[in-house]
Image: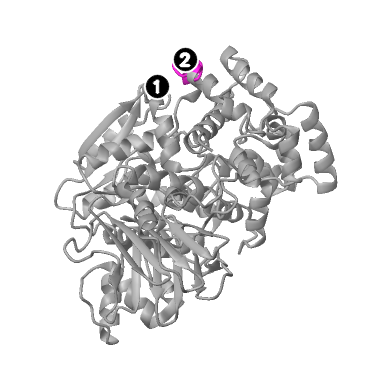
Amino acid sequence: MCGITGIFDTGGTRAIDLRLLELMNETQHHRGPDEGELYSETALGFGHRRLSIIDLALGRQPLFNEDRSVVIVFNGEIYNYRALMSELSGLGHQFKTRSDTETIVHAWEQWGTACLSRLTGMFAFAIWDRNQKMLFLARDHLGVKPLHYALLPDGLLVFGSELKSILANRSIARTLHARAIEDYFAFGYIPEPKTIYNDVFKLRPGHYLCVKVGDTAVRQMPYWDIPFQIDQQQRSQTDIEQELMERLTASVHSQMMSEVPLGAFLSGGVDSSAVVALMAQQNNQPVTTCSIGFADPEYDESSYASLVARRYHTEHHSELLGADSHHLVGRLAHLYDEPFADSSAIPTYRVCQLARQRVTVCLSGDGGDENFAGYRRYRYAMAEQKIRSQLPAWLRGPLFGTLGQIYPKADWAPQGLRAKTTFEALAKDLVGGYFHGVSVLPERQRALLFNQRFLTELQGYRALEVMREHALHAPTDDPLSLIQYLDFKTYLPGDILTKVDRASMAHSLEVRVPLLEHTFVEWISGLRSDLKLRGAEGKYIFKSALRPVLPDAILFRGKKGFSVPLASWFRGALQDQVRQAVLHPLMLDAGIFNQHYLYTLLDEHASGRKDNSAALWSLLMFSAFLQNNMGAQ
């Protein structure tokens, strides 16, 4: 695992500023503390920070082909590199190392952009092909590894694993992106391809860029998408479960390759427990496992983690998290570089810190909920959709829309629906209703949060357009598959994978995600929806397949997630801190917020009249971003 960065002159004539390149590279020192190298030639400069995992002696980067006409900087792991190395050797390519990095170089020489269809792994990389005078940037299928870029007015293209590497170039204007701010307060993160800044972008998962000398057109091109094509074969559930376990076992096995100590996160949930169980079955030594618990029993899952640890005799390590972790707010703002409002970033940071004391690589269970419809919100959305289907749109919209204006909270919610279900959600179509349900602040609350000046600047834009755009390109019209697809495009890369990447790399820890191996995701997407969500049971087929290796106490207990008790923290230990942050001068002078509503949110929560913890955490993290990044502007 590493950090990459670079500068490319699209005009093809200028020398690279090596002091700037080194500064960009060193902003990401935490991503690769083992080695740091630079390479430059006319019009091109690459920087690399290395966390040594494979081929410790020879896998240094930047890395070249035989005649040094192709050079790469790479962040990630290619799990099928040995098979590719064998194939490419048979085609006449000569290898000087046994690293997965060199495999990509020769794959590019052999297949060009089509090499991406041959790679299985997590990756973000940049290749300079001197013969073609082309820069090639690519990001893995699901977006496990990040890549940011900006094209400057003078024709320089700069890129880096983290936003901070690009911002080391002081010529980049730090003008906030109004639509990204609207997105942030809706989603709790800024979805691809936007960043918080107008002129900086994220490369989307499953996309690449090709930029040639003399061409300033920078267009993201897709190379992969989740098919969601239902397998029409008439197969027994037993056969499906058997293939599922075979595929997952193979994915876990391939991701256990390492020349440094390896372990796993173990939350006590189904997904991480499944990964640990399969690791233990393939390992002669006890698996090192790590978990974070909470002093508040309502949020604590450590007993379930201990249950799995005992069953598989893991070397288990656990710590408790309390409200005294509030000092991490400033640290998180620095790590994420832009506003990021998933409060589980705190325990994620802590579990990565705990793991790095013992291992260099960890496997996680991320991706199980998206693959197998494990989130409660899938169940709620399908229950809402069932109600919608029973009423014609011409009646449903006006009826529930009017009721929503009179009585926004539907406390009458029928069985199978959440108390959060609103008449407003039922008045909308599936995509609109799902977006309403997952929004940190619903649209009517965002309208109160923003001042009139900022609403005018938005020019009618609403964050719902992000989901609408993805829905237009969805390869399925099955309701459950569609909202899973939306999460794969938004929540998974924008929140879950971003959270884990920054938290793990802050501690120079590599995290791998076997449930997101792309061919496994493709196969799972082809299963019928009723095999994923059956009645009120999410992950139906996954849990059924896992019964030989995990107890029912793990498989069929209520899901808590990795959440933090913010509501009580904000009425207790953190009350003063959140008030000072929300009312910070940078917030009040930002030209974004309705100041009266900021006071309302704080007072309502402190008094106990409402739980505004989600909104307040979002504001707290936005304030921390402003203080960390905009205070000196």
Decide whether residue 572 is among the magenta residues: yes
Is residue 548 in view from this perspective?
Answer: no
542 or 120, which is in the foreground? 120
Residue tagged 1 = 323
Amino acid type of the residue tagged 2 in the rendering: Gly
Residue at the (66%, 40%) spot, across then down: 436
Residue at the (56%, 49%) spot, across then down: 173
Q: Is residue 616 above or below residue 70?
A: above
Q: Residues within 10 Å of mark 1 (few under 14, many from 20)?
A: some
Query: Could you tell me if the residues under marks 2 and 1 are in contact, i.e. CB atoms within 8 Å?
Result: yes
136 or 348, which is in the foreground? 136
Determine which of the numbered discs, if any, sits on residue 572 in the image.
Answer: 2
Q: Regarding mark 2 in the picture, which secondary structure is present there?
A: loop
Amino acid type of the residue tagged 1 in the rendering: Ala
Residue 515 image position (x, y, % from top left): 39, 54
What's drawn in magenta, residue-wise? 569-576
Give the position of the N terminus as an image quadrant. Answer: bottom left
Q: Is residue 431 above or below residue 319?
A: below
Q: CA distance from mark 2 to mark 1?
A: 9 Å
Decide whether residue 406 is among the magenta residues: no
Residue at the (21%, 39%) spot, across then down: 357
Residue 522 image position (x, y, % from top left): 47, 64
